[in-house]
Image (tube, rainbow, N blue to C red):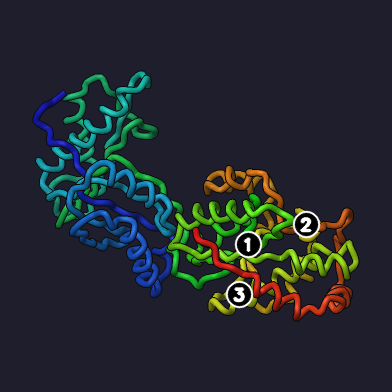
Amino acid sequence: MPDNIPTTTCSAVLCRYDEIALKGGNRMRFENQLIANIKKVLTPAVNLHLIRVRGRILFRFDELPEPTITAAVAKLKKVFGLASFSPGCLIESSLEMIEQTALSHFQHTYSQLSTTDRGSISFRIRVRRSDKQFPFSSNDMEIKIADQILKNYPNLNVNLRNADITTGVEIRKEWTFVFSEKIQGPGGLPSGSNNGALALLSGGIDSPVACYMVMKRGCPLHFLTFHSYPYIPGESVDKVARIVNVLNSYQLNGRLYACNLAESQKVIRDNCTAKFRTILYRRLMMKIATNLAESLNLNAIVTGESIGQVASQTMANLNSINHVTDLLVLRPLVGMDKVEIIEKAKRVGTYTLSQENCPDSCTVFAPNRPATTSQITRLEQEESKTNPQDLLTGSMANIKQISV
Protein backbone atom coordinates (compact mmCIF):
# COMPACT_ATOMS: atom_id res chain seq x y z
CA MET A 1 0.00 0.00 0.00
CA PRO A 2 1.58 3.35 -0.99
CA ASP A 3 2.89 5.65 1.73
CA ASN A 4 2.99 8.91 -0.19
CA ILE A 5 -0.78 9.38 -0.50
CA PRO A 6 -2.17 12.21 1.71
CA THR A 7 -4.70 11.38 4.41
CA THR A 8 -8.28 11.74 3.17
CA THR A 9 -10.13 14.57 4.93
CA CYS A 10 -13.61 15.93 4.33
CA SER A 11 -13.54 19.58 3.24
CA ALA A 12 -16.94 19.85 1.51
CA VAL A 13 -20.38 18.33 1.03
CA LEU A 14 -21.97 18.16 -2.40
CA CYS A 15 -25.78 18.20 -2.17
CA ARG A 16 -28.01 17.17 -5.08
CA TYR A 17 -31.70 17.83 -5.65
CA ASP A 18 -34.22 16.55 -8.20
CA GLU A 19 -37.74 17.93 -7.88
CA ILE A 20 -36.60 21.47 -7.08
CA ALA A 21 -34.97 21.65 -10.51
CA LEU A 22 -38.44 21.39 -12.08
CA LYS A 23 -39.80 24.51 -10.34
CA GLY A 24 -39.00 26.93 -13.17
CA GLY A 25 -39.26 30.54 -12.05
CA ASN A 26 -39.86 29.47 -8.44
CA ARG A 27 -36.77 27.28 -8.26
CA MET A 28 -34.64 29.85 -6.43
CA ARG A 29 -37.16 30.13 -3.59
CA PHE A 30 -37.12 26.38 -3.00
CA GLU A 31 -33.35 26.21 -3.36
CA ASN A 32 -32.86 29.02 -0.83
CA GLN A 33 -35.06 27.19 1.67
CA LEU A 34 -33.08 23.99 1.15
CA ILE A 35 -29.81 25.88 1.65
CA ALA A 36 -31.10 27.40 4.89
CA ASN A 37 -32.13 23.97 6.19
CA ILE A 38 -28.78 22.39 5.27
CA LYS A 39 -26.87 25.20 6.98
CA LYS A 40 -28.66 24.41 10.23
CA VAL A 41 -27.45 20.81 9.96
CA LEU A 42 -23.87 21.86 9.21
CA THR A 43 -23.62 24.43 12.01
CA PRO A 44 -20.63 22.64 13.64
CA ALA A 45 -18.61 23.58 10.55
CA VAL A 46 -16.69 26.83 10.75
CA ASN A 47 -16.07 29.25 7.86
CA LEU A 48 -18.88 27.67 5.85
CA HIS A 49 -18.84 28.75 2.18
CA LEU A 50 -21.66 28.17 -0.29
CA ILE A 51 -21.06 27.32 -3.94
CA ARG A 52 -24.13 27.10 -6.20
CA VAL A 53 -24.08 24.85 -9.25
CA ARG A 54 -27.28 24.13 -11.17
CA GLY A 55 -28.82 20.96 -9.75
CA ARG A 56 -26.23 20.95 -6.97
CA ILE A 57 -25.31 22.88 -3.85
CA LEU A 58 -21.77 22.63 -2.52
CA PHE A 59 -20.70 23.66 0.98
CA ARG A 60 -16.98 24.15 1.60
CA PHE A 61 -15.68 24.35 5.17
CA ASP A 62 -12.64 23.85 7.32
CA GLU A 63 -11.62 20.23 7.77
CA LEU A 64 -13.88 18.47 10.27
CA PRO A 65 -13.12 15.61 12.65
CA GLU A 66 -14.67 12.25 11.77
CA PRO A 67 -17.31 12.30 14.58
CA THR A 68 -18.59 15.69 13.39
CA ILE A 69 -18.84 14.42 9.81
CA THR A 70 -20.69 11.28 10.96
CA ALA A 71 -23.19 13.38 12.94
CA ALA A 72 -23.74 15.74 10.00
CA VAL A 73 -24.32 12.82 7.60
CA ALA A 74 -26.96 11.35 9.93
CA LYS A 75 -28.80 14.69 9.99
CA LEU A 76 -28.51 15.31 6.24
CA LYS A 77 -30.26 11.99 5.61
CA LYS A 78 -33.38 13.63 7.07
CA VAL A 79 -33.29 16.94 5.18
CA PHE A 80 -36.31 17.02 2.87
CA GLY A 81 -35.47 18.26 -0.60
CA LEU A 82 -32.13 16.44 -0.76
CA ALA A 83 -32.06 13.72 -3.42
CA SER A 84 -28.54 12.65 -2.42
CA PHE A 85 -25.33 14.07 -1.02
CA SER A 86 -21.63 13.23 -0.80
CA PRO A 87 -18.98 14.25 1.72
CA GLY A 88 -15.66 14.70 0.00
CA CYS A 89 -12.66 16.84 -0.91
CA LEU A 90 -12.65 20.09 -2.85
CA ILE A 91 -9.38 20.50 -4.73
CA GLU A 92 -7.82 22.36 -7.67
CA SER A 93 -8.55 21.00 -11.13
CA SER A 94 -5.11 19.65 -12.02
CA LEU A 95 -4.45 16.13 -13.29
CA GLU A 96 -1.88 15.37 -10.59
CA MET A 97 -4.08 16.56 -7.73
CA ILE A 98 -7.15 14.71 -9.07
CA GLU A 99 -5.28 11.42 -9.45
CA GLN A 100 -3.65 11.74 -6.04
CA THR A 101 -6.88 12.63 -4.22
CA ALA A 102 -8.92 9.96 -5.99
CA LEU A 103 -6.35 7.34 -4.97
CA SER A 104 -6.44 8.66 -1.41
CA HIS A 105 -10.23 8.37 -1.29
CA PHE A 106 -10.09 4.88 -2.71
CA GLN A 107 -7.45 3.84 -0.19
CA HIS A 108 -9.56 5.13 2.71
CA THR A 109 -12.69 3.25 1.55
CA TYR A 110 -10.72 0.11 0.69
CA SER A 111 -9.14 -0.02 4.14
CA GLN A 112 -12.62 -0.08 5.68
CA LEU A 113 -13.98 -2.78 3.36
CA SER A 114 -10.92 -5.00 3.40
CA THR A 115 -11.25 -5.57 7.17
CA THR A 116 -14.55 -7.38 6.58
CA ASP A 117 -15.06 -10.89 5.23
CA ARG A 118 -16.10 -9.95 1.69
CA GLY A 119 -13.82 -12.02 -0.54
CA SER A 120 -12.66 -10.16 -3.67
CA ILE A 121 -13.42 -6.43 -3.87
CA SER A 122 -14.47 -4.65 -7.06
CA PHE A 123 -14.32 -0.95 -7.91
CA ARG A 124 -15.23 1.59 -10.53
CA ILE A 125 -14.45 5.25 -11.24
CA ARG A 126 -17.15 7.71 -12.26
CA VAL A 127 -15.96 11.06 -13.69
CA ARG A 128 -18.20 13.96 -14.67
CA ARG A 129 -16.30 16.66 -16.58
CA SER A 130 -18.17 19.97 -16.85
CA ASP A 131 -15.06 21.90 -17.90
CA LYS A 132 -14.72 21.00 -21.57
CA GLN A 133 -11.33 22.77 -21.73
CA PHE A 134 -9.85 20.22 -19.33
CA PRO A 135 -7.35 18.26 -21.48
CA PHE A 136 -8.82 14.81 -20.80
CA SER A 137 -12.35 13.52 -21.39
CA SER A 138 -14.45 11.90 -18.66
CA ASN A 139 -13.70 8.46 -20.06
CA ASP A 140 -9.96 9.22 -20.28
CA MET A 141 -9.93 10.32 -16.64
CA GLU A 142 -11.77 7.21 -15.51
CA ILE A 143 -9.13 5.05 -17.21
CA LYS A 144 -6.21 7.08 -15.82
CA ILE A 145 -7.50 6.92 -12.23
CA ALA A 146 -8.36 3.22 -12.52
CA ASP A 147 -4.86 2.50 -13.82
CA GLN A 148 -3.33 4.27 -10.82
CA ILE A 149 -5.45 2.21 -8.44
CA LEU A 150 -4.64 -1.09 -10.18
CA LYS A 151 -0.91 -0.35 -9.98
CA ASN A 152 -1.22 -0.20 -6.20
CA TYR A 153 -3.95 -2.86 -5.82
CA PRO A 154 -3.38 -5.33 -8.70
CA ASN A 155 -5.75 -7.98 -7.29
CA LEU A 156 -8.86 -5.83 -7.55
CA ASN A 157 -11.59 -6.29 -10.16
CA VAL A 158 -13.23 -3.55 -12.20
CA ASN A 159 -17.04 -3.74 -12.18
CA LEU A 160 -18.79 -0.91 -13.99
CA ARG A 161 -22.32 -1.97 -12.99
CA ASN A 162 -22.28 -3.07 -9.36
CA ALA A 163 -18.96 -2.28 -7.71
CA ASP A 164 -18.11 -2.54 -4.01
CA ILE A 165 -16.29 0.80 -4.18
CA THR A 166 -17.23 3.75 -6.39
CA THR A 167 -14.95 6.79 -6.44
CA GLY A 168 -16.63 9.84 -7.96
CA VAL A 169 -14.96 12.87 -9.50
CA GLU A 170 -16.67 16.08 -10.68
CA ILE A 171 -14.32 18.30 -12.67
CA ARG A 172 -15.12 21.98 -13.12
CA LYS A 173 -12.95 24.91 -14.19
CA GLU A 174 -12.70 26.47 -10.73
CA TRP A 175 -12.52 23.27 -8.67
CA THR A 176 -12.83 19.49 -8.62
CA PHE A 177 -14.80 17.47 -6.11
CA VAL A 178 -13.72 13.92 -5.19
CA PHE A 179 -15.93 11.61 -3.15
CA SER A 180 -16.49 7.95 -2.28
CA GLU A 181 -20.13 7.87 -1.16
CA LYS A 182 -23.40 8.91 -2.75
CA ILE A 183 -25.80 8.88 0.20
CA GLN A 184 -29.53 8.79 -0.45
CA GLY A 185 -31.57 11.71 0.87
CA PRO A 186 -35.32 11.66 1.56
CA GLY A 187 -36.28 13.70 -1.51
CA GLY A 188 -39.44 15.78 -1.50
CA LEU A 189 -39.50 19.53 -0.91
CA PRO A 190 -37.60 21.53 1.72
CA SER A 191 -39.33 21.96 5.07
CA GLY A 192 -40.79 25.46 5.19
CA SER A 193 -41.31 25.80 1.44
CA ASN A 194 -45.07 25.25 1.91
CA ASN A 195 -47.53 26.50 4.50
CA GLY A 196 -47.75 24.87 7.91
CA ALA A 197 -50.47 22.55 9.21
CA LEU A 198 -51.74 21.02 12.45
CA ALA A 199 -51.48 17.23 12.67
CA LEU A 200 -53.80 15.09 14.76
CA LEU A 201 -51.27 12.70 16.24
CA SER A 202 -52.07 9.58 18.22
CA GLY A 203 -49.67 6.98 19.54
CA GLY A 204 -50.64 4.56 16.78
CA ILE A 205 -48.86 3.55 13.60
CA ASP A 206 -50.83 5.56 11.06
CA SER A 207 -50.79 9.21 12.08
CA PRO A 208 -46.98 9.55 12.40
CA VAL A 209 -46.64 8.22 8.83
CA ALA A 210 -49.24 10.73 7.66
CA CYS A 211 -47.21 13.47 9.33
CA TYR A 212 -44.03 12.35 7.59
CA MET A 213 -45.70 12.31 4.18
CA VAL A 214 -47.05 15.86 4.56
CA MET A 215 -43.76 17.12 5.99
CA LYS A 216 -42.02 15.67 2.93
CA ARG A 217 -44.02 18.08 0.78
CA GLY A 218 -42.43 21.04 2.56
CA CYS A 219 -45.17 21.60 5.18
CA PRO A 220 -43.88 22.20 8.73
CA LEU A 221 -46.19 20.71 11.34
CA HIS A 222 -47.36 21.36 14.86
CA PHE A 223 -49.10 18.48 16.61
CA LEU A 224 -52.28 17.95 18.62
CA THR A 225 -52.92 14.78 20.58
CA PHE A 226 -55.96 13.79 22.65
CA HIS A 227 -55.96 11.82 25.87
CA SER A 228 -58.57 10.79 28.42
CA TYR A 229 -56.79 10.88 31.76
CA PRO A 230 -57.60 9.33 34.26
CA TYR A 231 -59.37 6.74 32.08
CA ILE A 232 -56.16 6.09 30.18
CA PRO A 233 -52.68 6.48 31.72
CA GLY A 234 -50.71 9.71 31.44
CA GLU A 235 -47.94 7.75 29.74
CA SER A 236 -49.95 7.98 26.51
CA VAL A 237 -48.91 11.64 26.15
CA ASP A 238 -45.28 10.78 26.95
CA LYS A 239 -45.38 8.21 24.16
CA VAL A 240 -46.69 10.77 21.67
CA ALA A 241 -44.00 13.24 22.79
CA ARG A 242 -41.32 10.68 21.92
CA ILE A 243 -42.92 10.18 18.50
CA VAL A 244 -42.86 13.95 17.99
CA ASN A 245 -39.13 13.95 18.76
CA VAL A 246 -38.61 11.48 15.90
CA LEU A 247 -40.76 13.54 13.52
CA ASN A 248 -39.02 16.76 14.54
CA SER A 249 -35.71 15.28 13.40
CA TYR A 250 -37.08 15.87 9.86
CA GLN A 251 -38.10 19.50 10.45
CA LEU A 252 -37.57 22.51 12.69
CA ASN A 253 -39.08 21.80 16.07
CA GLY A 254 -42.86 21.51 15.88
CA ARG A 255 -44.82 22.09 19.07
CA LEU A 256 -47.00 19.43 20.71
CA TYR A 257 -50.36 20.25 22.27
CA ALA A 258 -52.39 17.80 24.36
CA CYS A 259 -56.12 18.03 25.00
CA ASN A 260 -57.82 16.08 27.79
CA LEU A 261 -61.10 14.94 26.27
CA ALA A 262 -62.34 12.82 29.19
CA GLU A 263 -65.02 15.17 30.53
CA SER A 264 -66.46 15.79 27.08
CA GLN A 265 -66.47 12.06 26.36
CA LYS A 266 -68.43 11.44 29.56
CA VAL A 267 -71.07 13.95 28.45
CA ILE A 268 -71.36 12.26 25.05
CA ARG A 269 -71.51 8.84 26.71
CA ASP A 270 -74.31 9.90 29.07
CA ASN A 271 -76.47 11.76 26.55
CA CYS A 272 -75.97 10.36 23.04
CA THR A 273 -76.85 7.14 21.22
CA ALA A 274 -74.07 4.63 21.88
CA LYS A 275 -73.33 3.60 18.30
CA PHE A 276 -72.50 7.21 17.32
CA ARG A 277 -70.05 7.88 20.16
CA THR A 278 -66.82 7.41 18.20
CA ILE A 279 -68.00 9.60 15.32
CA LEU A 280 -69.13 12.28 17.79
CA TYR A 281 -65.71 12.13 19.45
CA ARG A 282 -64.06 12.59 16.06
CA ARG A 283 -66.29 15.51 15.14
CA LEU A 284 -65.42 17.21 18.43
CA MET A 285 -61.72 16.55 17.87
CA MET A 286 -61.97 18.14 14.44
CA LYS A 287 -63.69 21.23 15.89
CA ILE A 288 -60.97 21.55 18.52
CA ALA A 289 -58.25 21.11 15.90
CA THR A 290 -59.84 23.77 13.70
CA ASN A 291 -59.89 26.31 16.53
CA LEU A 292 -56.31 25.57 17.52
CA ALA A 293 -55.05 25.63 13.92
CA GLU A 294 -56.68 28.99 13.28
CA SER A 295 -55.17 30.41 16.48
CA LEU A 296 -51.74 29.26 15.27
CA ASN A 297 -52.30 30.65 11.73
CA LEU A 298 -52.07 27.17 10.22
CA ASN A 299 -53.77 26.41 6.94
CA ALA A 300 -54.72 22.75 7.15
CA ILE A 301 -55.34 19.74 9.38
CA VAL A 302 -53.52 16.42 8.86
CA THR A 303 -54.98 13.07 9.91
CA GLY A 304 -53.87 9.44 9.58
CA GLU A 305 -57.22 8.16 8.35
CA SER A 306 -57.45 5.54 5.59
CA ILE A 307 -60.71 4.61 3.88
CA GLY A 308 -62.42 1.66 5.53
CA GLN A 309 -59.71 0.84 8.06
CA VAL A 310 -62.05 1.26 11.07
CA ALA A 311 -65.73 2.08 11.48
CA SER A 312 -65.17 5.83 11.79
CA GLN A 313 -63.21 5.85 8.52
CA THR A 314 -65.89 4.76 6.08
CA MET A 315 -66.56 7.33 3.38
CA ALA A 316 -69.89 8.29 4.97
CA ASN A 317 -68.33 8.83 8.37
CA LEU A 318 -65.32 10.71 6.99
CA ASN A 319 -67.77 13.04 5.27
CA SER A 320 -69.64 13.55 8.55
CA ILE A 321 -66.38 14.39 10.32
CA ASN A 322 -65.25 16.77 7.55
CA HIS A 323 -68.53 18.66 7.79
CA VAL A 324 -67.55 20.44 11.03
CA THR A 325 -64.50 22.27 9.59
CA ASP A 326 -63.86 24.75 6.80
CA LEU A 327 -60.13 24.06 6.85
CA LEU A 328 -58.41 21.84 4.32
CA VAL A 329 -58.11 18.30 5.71
CA LEU A 330 -55.13 16.33 4.39
CA ARG A 331 -55.34 12.53 4.55
CA PRO A 332 -52.19 11.24 2.83
CA LEU A 333 -52.87 7.62 3.84
CA VAL A 334 -56.38 7.55 2.39
CA GLY A 335 -55.60 4.88 -0.23
CA MET A 336 -52.92 2.91 1.61
CA ASP A 337 -53.38 -0.46 3.29
CA LYS A 338 -51.98 -1.39 6.69
CA VAL A 339 -48.99 -3.33 5.35
CA GLU A 340 -47.84 -0.33 3.31
CA ILE A 341 -48.25 1.98 6.29
CA ILE A 342 -46.29 -0.34 8.60
CA GLU A 343 -43.39 -0.58 6.14
CA LYS A 344 -43.25 3.19 5.86
CA ALA A 345 -43.42 3.60 9.66
CA LYS A 346 -40.35 1.38 9.95
CA ARG A 347 -38.44 3.53 7.45
CA VAL A 348 -39.50 6.76 9.17
CA GLY A 349 -38.41 5.42 12.56
CA THR A 350 -41.72 5.63 14.47
CA TYR A 351 -42.87 2.01 14.25
CA THR A 352 -41.18 0.71 17.42
CA LEU A 353 -42.59 3.55 19.51
CA SER A 354 -46.06 3.09 18.01
CA GLN A 355 -45.95 -0.59 18.93
CA GLU A 356 -45.74 0.21 22.65
CA ASN A 357 -48.99 -0.91 24.25
CA CYS A 358 -50.93 2.16 25.36
CA PRO A 359 -54.70 2.78 25.04
CA ASP A 360 -56.02 5.40 22.63
CA SER A 361 -58.41 8.20 23.58
CA CYS A 362 -61.00 7.01 21.05
CA THR A 363 -61.24 3.66 22.83
CA VAL A 364 -62.63 5.26 26.01
CA PHE A 365 -66.36 4.44 26.34
CA ALA A 366 -66.24 3.02 22.82
CA PRO A 367 -69.46 1.25 21.73
CA ASN A 368 -69.50 -2.48 21.06
CA ARG A 369 -71.09 -1.97 17.64
CA PRO A 370 -70.07 1.44 16.24
CA ALA A 371 -72.00 2.92 13.35
CA THR A 372 -70.33 2.44 9.97
CA THR A 373 -72.56 5.01 8.31
CA SER A 374 -74.05 8.27 9.51
CA GLN A 375 -76.13 11.21 8.40
CA ILE A 376 -75.04 14.73 9.29
CA THR A 377 -78.53 15.77 10.40
CA ARG A 378 -78.75 12.81 12.78
CA LEU A 379 -75.34 13.60 14.26
CA GLU A 380 -76.31 17.22 14.76
CA GLN A 381 -79.40 16.04 16.61
CA GLU A 382 -77.22 13.89 18.86
CA GLU A 383 -74.85 16.81 19.51
CA SER A 384 -77.76 19.08 20.43
CA LYS A 385 -78.31 16.85 23.49
CA THR A 386 -74.93 17.93 24.90
CA ASN A 387 -74.77 21.72 24.41
CA PRO A 388 -71.99 21.40 21.82
CA GLN A 389 -70.59 24.92 22.30
CA ASP A 390 -69.99 24.23 25.98
CA LEU A 391 -68.25 20.96 25.09
CA LEU A 392 -65.97 22.79 22.65
CA THR A 393 -65.21 25.64 25.06
CA GLY A 394 -64.47 23.22 27.89
CA SER A 395 -62.26 21.09 25.71
CA MET A 396 -60.28 24.09 24.44
CA ALA A 397 -59.62 25.06 28.06
CA ASN A 398 -58.06 21.62 28.60
CA ILE A 399 -55.33 22.11 25.98
CA LYS A 400 -51.75 22.28 27.24
CA GLN A 401 -48.47 22.60 25.42
CA ILE A 402 -46.18 19.64 26.11
CA SER A 403 -42.38 19.88 26.27
CA VAL A 404 -40.66 17.72 23.65
Q: Secondary structure at mark 2?
A: loop
**Residue 390 x/y as whole percent:** 75, 79
Which residue lies under the disc numbered 3?
292
Q: Amino acid at mark 1?
A: Thr
**Amino acid tagged 2:** Val
Residue 377 showing in the rendered view: no
Query: Crowding at label 3, few (<14), some or many (≥20) Cα neighbours within 10 Å?
Result: some
400 vs 336, left or right, is left
* Figure quadrant of residue 112: top left
Residue at image location 44% in from the left, 58% down from the top: 80
Distance from the alpha carbon under mark 3 to that under mark 2: 23 Å
Crowding at label 1, few (<14), some or many (≥20) Cα neighbours within 10 Å? many
Asked if residue 87 can be seen in this view, the reply is yes
Q: Earlier in the sequence, mark 1 or mark 2?
A: 1
Q: Residue at x 62, y 51 (%)?
A: 235
Q: CA distance from mark 3 to mark 1?
A: 12 Å
Residue 62, horizontal then vertical, whole percent: 17, 52
Which dot marks residue 364? 2
Contact, CB < 8 Å: mark 3 with mark 2? Answer: no
Task: Report which residue position mark 1 lands on.
Answer: 225
Instruction: Count the labels in the image.
Output: 3
Q: Nearer the viewer, mark 3 or mark 2?
A: 2
The earlier-in-sequence mark between 3 and 1 is 1
Q: Who is closer to the viewer here, 217 or 366? A: 366
Please give the name of the residue rendered at 31% of the width and 33% of the height, measured from the top-left corner.
Answer: 165
